[in-house]
Image (tube, grey):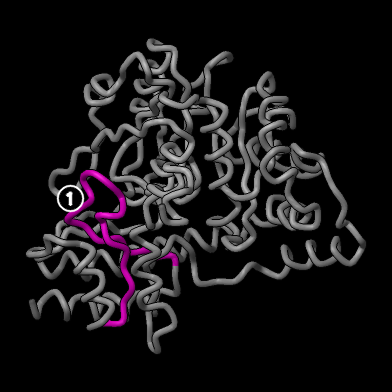
Amino acid sequence: MSIVNSLSPRAITAPESGIVEVVNYARGREGLLPLWVGEGDLPTPDFISKAAMDALAAGETFYTWQRGIPELRQALSDYYGRHFGVTLSPEHFYITGSGMQAIQIAVQAMTSPGDEIAYLTPAWPNIAAALEIAGARSVGVELQFEGGKWAVDLDRIEAAITPKTKGLFVNTPSNPTGWTATKQDLAQILEIARKHGLWIMADEIYARYFYAGGRAPSFFDVMEPGDKIFFVNSFSKNWSMTGWRVGWIVGPPETGQVLENLIQYSTSGVAQFMQKGAVAALNHGDDFVAANISKAAEARDILCDALIATNRVETLKPDGALYAFLKIDGITDSRKAAIDIVDKTGVGLAPGAAFGAGGELFLRACFLRDPAQVRTAAERLCDYIMSR
């Protein structure tokens, strides 16, 4: 038996990220325009970094609150009051070491080995992987795609529910499709969850990136006291903090000790000086987030208008999130196409096959970048498409 084969089967079978595979293939190339991962091109703004550096210099380097420092939990309470119109005490908030860990903690809280979670696909691949590694089973429910537009089929969700189903994972606005649930969609999904006694894990990380204005519809708009919902989120996208690895969960206060215990036995809490940076992001970052959203909207129009004009790309401008999900005529192997495109154009795209069922024929481009760079990327991609 090899050393690797002596490891846990769950660990051995954890899939390589199809996104990271392409990134590793071409990372660092001269002239590269990297639209493959879900982050912007700006570093963390100074007012956030300075708050963390000041806390570090002041010696805030000791063990801290497992649920998050009180100041940060209060800042999140205030943030949700401003942007979601809800009154939530700090006891609803739990700080995690990234949005990814927020998902892992929620999965651990919701499932036992052999349980099932249904999720809408194409989807960020980490959700299915997190479930499988935890010993649960991920059940993909395909969104409908027609005329460049994505939509949810509620009958498909109902059909995916079995006696082993413990919850539904709903990401809206969606990575990678940009599908954005309406308030009616969310009310109907919540009714399904209530009917079957299921939890909902709501990933609303892109809620502020909603191009009709304001924020996207949220489960906060339709839920009632007693509904079983964990909201998972991150500081990454709004405040250009992808490398910080700080996220949060919004959950019922009754679950607080369970969540605290799961945090304790994974990371034992997020560094206090990093949390101070997150406080600054929430309390002083609304203008920065608004500027990021404005930039994304401009870049979205540049990229999508150019590609749609070729008449060889099936897509529409996404209603939300940071991604154009592109179906290019003649492409049947998105992994092979992503490698070919980066080789021939210097534009890094993520292969749709990485996002599961329904994504195989697509490529994903993140447009949260300098619109001038996105225009150059669009020109290169259009030349590639028209030369096929």
Which residues make up the magenta segment? 345-368
User: Farthest residue toward the bottom?
Assistant: 30
Horizontal side, residue 346 vs residue 316: left or right: right
Horizontal side, residue 388 vs residue 23: left or right: left
Picture quadrant where residue 363 is located: bottom left
Q: Nearer the viewer, residue 365 or 123?
A: 123
Q: Is residue 351 above or below residue 138?
A: below
User: Farthest residue toward the front?
Assistant: 1
Give the amino acid type for the residue marked by disc 1 in the picture: Gly
Residue 214 in view of the camera = no
Q: x and y percent of residue 213 in the render? A: 44, 47
- Tally of marks: 1
Q: x and y percent of residue 146 in the render? A: 14, 44
Q: x and y percent of residue 111 in the render? A: 49, 25
Picture quadrant where residue 185 is located: top left
Residue drawn where x is 68% and y is 36% of the image = 94
User: Which element type, helix, strand or loop, lies under badge 1?
Assistant: loop
Residue hosting label 1: 148
Q: x and y percent of residue 22 in the render? A: 34, 69
Q: Nearer the viewer, residue 346 or 296?
A: 346
Q: Nearer the viewer, residue 27 or 83?
A: 27
Horizontal side, residue 91 vs residue 374: left or right: right
Residue 255 in view of the camera = yes
> Which quarter of the rendered picture does the C terminus lie within?
bottom left
Residue drawn where x is 88% and y is 56% of the image = 60
User: Farthest residue toward the right?
Assistant: 58
Residue drawn where x is 38% and y is 57% of the image = 17
Q: Is residue 30 above or below residue 135?
A: below
